[in-house]
């Protein structure tokens, strides 16, 4: 038996490939399915099942394309009601994959159909659990997502279900089982999951707050629900795509892989109201970009920030990318349900510039110059767009915290006439913020190069958060 984790860092997502005696099962596949099919061919094996731990919110699963291309069956846990043909398994139902087995454990809580898959090896030994969003390393799945699709499924109800699932289905299992979750650190599907992507169940029983044996249900609910931030706006839309079905990625790619000259690109933007997304490096974007375009660099957490900053997955999109990275960009947009890409700028930004088209830039400052400015009696306001937890951990004393995730709620705080400084941890998020502010008509931005990491290295004075209670 071979069980492999296929981890995609930009989404903090883990799919799993199980092969035994010429048969394969794929768990929670990404949208682009050819790599799974190629792997099965290399193993001289046939894909038999696609197991879905639940209806995902943070990405569009590839199960439908896999079914259409391979004829394999899709398997969901109890209570799932997909809008397409699938096997709805019973609790404790067992599926054979070659000489190995997969047992379905219904573990509602993150969502009602959420299920954990117990993998049993060819000798009949329980090997591990593919937990989806029921159990992460160091955390458990947030129980507030389903209510954005079905209002009656309140976070309190789901948290109660999750408590029961963990205690009745997961914790009685053997300590030596390997935990294979659907996500790692960086995913918005949990609060504070580990950077590690696997662990033993025994170690999780010792270290994961949610698995404390002496915890009451009310204590569990309180700890689980405390500090949950609002989920990204695209989550409910992805859930519905995964429930109802979606257009094949092949169709999406064919429509989107359309090179446009600068004149055609400009006309398309004007005629369709498409959003122009520039996926180059933040340094290149700062030097020059198409006016009102939004920067979300392909080399960062691209898909997550697209989902967080663009409200509607049906939004028409035009792409500015480095040559050769257009297909990658379209694919990564589709992973989170943004299937309405209309084309890309042929020749990239350089073609736009050579065509004599108007372009814009973002003002930047080195940390040395920034340090000098802060030392003066008069200086510009500073805006820190990192998460609140990062800001509270350590920040420049005079900085205002305006987290990028919720930038639209802070627009009134940015001065229109006076220049101001903007920074994040390393420069990626602050450039996203700068591009959004400029698209809203706020242009007096000075981005601090290198972000907070460079600020600390330059020896600029910082402070940590002081809890009000300590001041009494």
Image: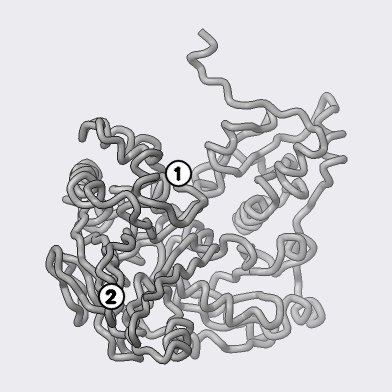
Q: Residue furthest left?
A: 90
Does residue 331 lie above or below 110 as drawn? below
Rendered residue at 20%/79% (across/down): 86
Report whether 131 appears left or right of 318. left
Residues marked 2 and 1 touching at CB (< 8 Å): no
Name the foreground residue: 356 vs 398: 398
The dot on residue 403 is: none
* Spatial separation of the CA atoms under disc 2 and disc 1: 33 Å
Residue 246: give x, y in percent of width and height. 33, 79
Task: Locate residue 89, reporting x and y percent.
Answer: 15, 71
Asked if residue 382 can be seen in this view, the reply is: yes
Residue drawn at 25 percent across, 32 percent down: 215
Residue 100: numbered disc: 2
Name the colouring of the figure. Answer: one colour
Q: Label 1: which residue?
A: 192
Residue 270: x and y in percent read: 58, 76
Is 420 placed above or below 124 here?
above
**Residue 458's x, y, as percent?**
82, 38
Q: Residue furthest top?
A: 472
Would you identify the image quadrant in which residue 461 lies? Answer: top right
Secondary-structure class at tag 2: strand
In the rendered image, the quadrant that contains the N terminus is bottom left
Residue 166 lies, with reference to residue 269, above or below; the image says above
Quick check: 255 above or below 121?
below
Locate residue 343: give its quadrant: bottom right
């Amino acid at each position: 038996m071979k069980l492999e984790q296929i981890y995609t860092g930009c989404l903090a997502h883990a799919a799993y490939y199980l092969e035994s005696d010429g048969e394969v099962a794929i768990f929670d596949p990404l949208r682009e399915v050819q790599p799974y099919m190629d792997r099965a061919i290399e193993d001289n094996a046939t894909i038999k099942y696609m197991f879905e731990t639940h209806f995902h919110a943070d990405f569009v699963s590839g199960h439908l394309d896999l079914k259409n291309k391979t004829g394999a069956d899709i398997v969901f846990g109890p209570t799932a009601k997909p809008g397409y043909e699938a096997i709805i398994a019973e609790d404790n139902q067992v599926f054979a994959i070659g000489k190995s087995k997969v047992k379905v454990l219904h573990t509602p809580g993150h969502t009602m159909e959420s299920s954990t898959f117990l993998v049993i090896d060819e000798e009949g030994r329980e090997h591990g659990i593919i937990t989806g969003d029921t159990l992460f390393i160091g955390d458990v799945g947030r129980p507030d997502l389903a209510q954005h699709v079905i209002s009656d499924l309140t976070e309190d109800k789901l948290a109660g279900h999750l408590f029961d699932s963990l205690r009745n289905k997961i914790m009685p299992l053997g300590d030596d089982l390997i935990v294979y979750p659907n996500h790692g650190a960086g995913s918005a599907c949990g609060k504070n999951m580990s950077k590690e992507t696997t662990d033993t169940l025994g170690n999780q029983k010792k270290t994961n707050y949610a698995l404390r044996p002496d915890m009451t249900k009310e204590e569990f609910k309180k700890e689980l629900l405390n500090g949950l931030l609002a989920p990204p706006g695209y989550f409910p839309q992805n859930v519905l795509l995964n429930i109802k079905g979606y257009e094949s990625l092949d169709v999406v790619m064919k429509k989107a892989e359309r090179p446009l000259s600068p004149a055609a690109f400009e006309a398309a933007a004007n005629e369709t109201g498409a959003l122009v997304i520039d996926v180059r490096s933040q340094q290149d974007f700062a030097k020059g970009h198409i006016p009102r375009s939004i920067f979300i660099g392909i080399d960062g957490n691209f898909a997550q920030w697209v989902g967080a900053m663009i409200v509607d997955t049906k939004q028409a999109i035009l792409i500015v990318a480095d040559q050769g990275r257009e297909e990658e960009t379209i694919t990564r947009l589709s992973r989170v349900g943004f299937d309405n890409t209309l084309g890309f700028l042929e020749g990239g930004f350089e073609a736009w510039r050579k065509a004599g088209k108007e372009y814009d830039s973002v003002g930047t400052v080195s940390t040395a110059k920034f340090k000098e400015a802060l030392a003066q009696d008069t200086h510009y306001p500073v805006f820190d767009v990192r998460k609140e937890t990062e800001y509270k951990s350590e920040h420049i004393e005079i900085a205002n915290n305006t987290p990028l995730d919720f930038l639209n709620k802070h627009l009134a705080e940015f001065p229109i006439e006076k220049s101001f400084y903007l920074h994040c941890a390393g420069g990626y998020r602050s450039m996203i913020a700068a591009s959004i502010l400029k698209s809203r008509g706020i242009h007096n931005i000075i981005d601090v190069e290198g972000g907070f990491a460079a600020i600390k290295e330059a020896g600029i004075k910082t402070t940590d958060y002081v809890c009000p209670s300590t001041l009494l």
